Amino acid sequence: MKKECLEIVKGKCNDCHACALGNTRNNIVFSDGNPETAKIVLIGEAPGETEDMTGTPFVGRAGKLLTEFLAGTGISREEDVFIINTVKCRPPENRVPTDEEKSACRKFLEAQIDIIKPRAIVLCGATALKSFIELDKKQTISKVRGQWMNISVDGKEYKAMTIFHPSYLLRNHSMEEGSPRRLMQEDLQNIKNEVLSDVNHDFIDFSSDNIFAKDKQLSFV
């Protein structure tokens, strides 16, 4: 039933030209994941070049790294997470989407969340966070990440947590204590324990001998 409902929303999104991004896209980038089994909705910023060409979110370098981190904490991208963006079309030159563009796309974002009815929402990066929470100048993503909060979506309350955007981790390779990658690992483990305690998947070891500690072995890092 969820798949059928999402297909209706996707069809309307495909016809949308409410903002200028609809005139420059190759494809809308609607979602990725299994809506019937996903317990988490992960919201990113906006499609990039690879996503615009494929129609799938988080499939570029940052997306591949995100997939590795999810798997590393026993979270299945294919079964546990439904991935969407604040806007469904790529902004030119991968710039941050404007408030007007996000507003034009908001009805699709809210419809996706309402259909999935997730146990929790993961806000991936500052743009996703600012789409739901107004920050003051002292609140940076480094200070608010990893904290559970409640956000309102179309009048409904959801448990949510902010994590680093994986594009930030591409520039920070260390897995030392307190490093962005280590904090990302800890945040995802927190999410797994809180939201998916009844779901078990194999996980990738994060020890010093694993692929995360040997970034040069990863083609996407």
Image: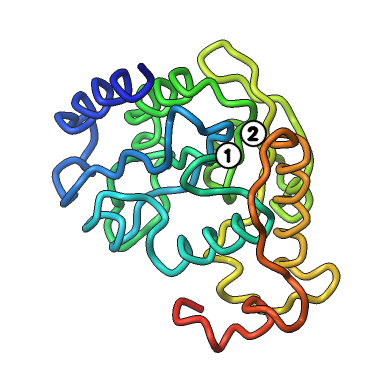
Q: Is residue 37 above or below residue 20?
A: above
Quarter holding the N terminus is top left
**Residue occupying the point 45% across, 27% down:** 36
Q: Residue at x 28, y 62 (%)?
A: 49
Relative to 35, is 214 above or below? Answer: below
In the image, which disc is placed on residue 130?
A: 1
Report the front residue among 65 and 104.
65
Q: Nearer the viewer, residue 69 or 177?
A: 69
| Labels 2 and 1 touching (C-beta < 8 A) | yes
The residue at the point 53 percent across, 35 percent down is 41
Q: Amino acid at mark 1?
A: Lys
Q: Secondary structure at mark 1?
A: helix
Mark 2: secondary structure: loop
- Badge 2 density bin: few <14, some 14–19, many ≥20, Cα 10 Å: few
Find residue 139 and report its horizontal and vertical position in percent.
Answer: 75, 46
Q: Residue at x 26, y 49 (%)?
A: 55
Vertical placement of 151 versus 100: above or below?
Answer: above
Neighbours of disc 1 within 10 Å: few (<14), some (14-19), many (20+): few
Instruction: Point out residue 143 in the picture as x, y percentages from the top left corner.
Output: 78, 51
Among the 4 quarters of the image, the one containing residue 183: bottom right
Q: Residue furthest right?
A: 177
Q: Which residue is mark 2?
A: 134
